[in-house]
Image (spheres, rainbow, N blue to C red):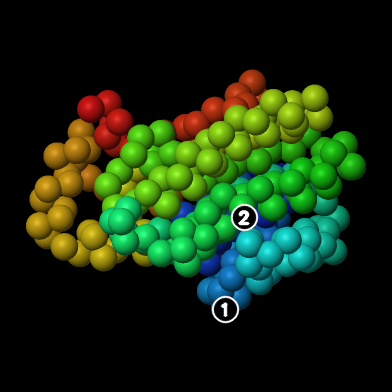
């Protein structure tokens, strides 16, 4: 299936985890992918894997908290592939800390990457889509933590609730330009961010009963949801938050 033939996608946070899985999935379905990440060497590795599989990919270094770097990322995408049809805002960070112990540094950093970064990337790429008359699709990385709270993650939760609100408002404002905006809301996914917790047997034992499917999700499962929302198969969906959590929020 080549749902993204002749299309160009930017994926942020694409050096590893869900971002890398998303870049690979979009490329498998025909997209030329701009693999964007702060870690250029790992982004290059993802891009190389795409090219080795017969796809098109270009790696770009970007700090999504810096508007100038995001503008340079778009410029690199246009230089390589002329335009952008899809933006997947996957870059994000998380840091467990009790509310009473959260420092200004971690609060500011978490909001900057997880929320302001989505704003910068989305606004800059959406302006390009509007100028070119592109019926674009933007998929943001929210979380189940953007729908319900969770202990020790006040800064992360706040950032993801912000992404949900931003997604809904972007969907309204960009609909007249035929640009659709949705978010994915993963639960516990087996990524680098969750490795420390998943390596703790006692933590796993206490957490697993919260998930009806009794397992953690895979990055590829989130990537498939991103691909759906980024494709024309979801043509009448905008402003939606797609939960991928093994049923956790049913409790």
Residue linked to disc 2: 117
Q: Position of residue 239 (x, y in %)?
A: 60, 28
2 or 121, which lies in front?
A: 121
- The residue lying at 46 percent from left, 63 percent from top is 104
Residue drawn 46% across and 58% down?
A: 107
Q: Secondary structure at mark 2?
A: helix
Whether residue 42 is visible, yes or no, is yes
Secondary element at tag 1? helix
Position of residue 39 in the picture relative to residue 212 (left or right): right
Can you give x and y, in whole percent of width and height, for residue 65 in the image? 63, 62
Disc number placed over residue 177 in the picture, else none: none
Residue 120, percent from left and from top: 69, 52
Count of number-bearing discs: 2
Q: Which quadrant holds the N terminus? A: top right
Q: Nearer the viewer, mark 2 or mark 1?
A: 2
Tell me the CA gap for discs 2 and 1. 21 Å
Q: Residue furthest bottom?
A: 41
Q: State the residue in front, 189 or 71.
A: 71
């Amino acid at each position: 299936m080549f749902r993204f033939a002749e299309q160009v996608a930017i994926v942020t946070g694409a050096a590893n985890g869900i971002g890398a899985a998303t870049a690979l999935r979009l490329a498998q379905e025909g997209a030329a992918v701009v693999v964007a990440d702060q870690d250029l060497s790992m982004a290059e590795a993802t891009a190389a894997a795409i090219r080795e599989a017969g796809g098109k990919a270009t790696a770009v270094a970007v700090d999504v908290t810096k508007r100038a770097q995001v503008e340079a990322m778009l410029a690199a995408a246009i230089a390589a592939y002329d335009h952008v049809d899809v933006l997947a805002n996957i870059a994000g960070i998380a840091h467990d800390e009790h509310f009473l112990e959260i420092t200004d540094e971690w609060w500011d950093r978490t909001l900057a990457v997880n929320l302001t970064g989505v704003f910068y990337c989305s606004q800059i790429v959406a302006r390009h889509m509007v100028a070119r008359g592109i019926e674009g699709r933007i998929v943001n990385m929210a979380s189940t933590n953007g729908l319900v709270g969770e202990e020790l993650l006040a800064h992360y939760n706040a950032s993801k609730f912000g992404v949900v609100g931003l997604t809904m408002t972007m969907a309204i404002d960009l609909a007249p330009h035929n640009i659709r905006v949705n978010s994915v809301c993963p639960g516990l996914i087996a990524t680098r961010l969750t490795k420390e917790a998943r390596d703790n047997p006692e933590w796993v034992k206490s957490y697993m009963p919260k998930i009806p499917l009794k397992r953690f999700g895979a990055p590829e499962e989130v990537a498939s949801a991103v691909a759906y929302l980024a494709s024309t198969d979801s043509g009448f969906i905008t402003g939606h938050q797609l939960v991928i959590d093994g049923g956790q929020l049913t409790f």
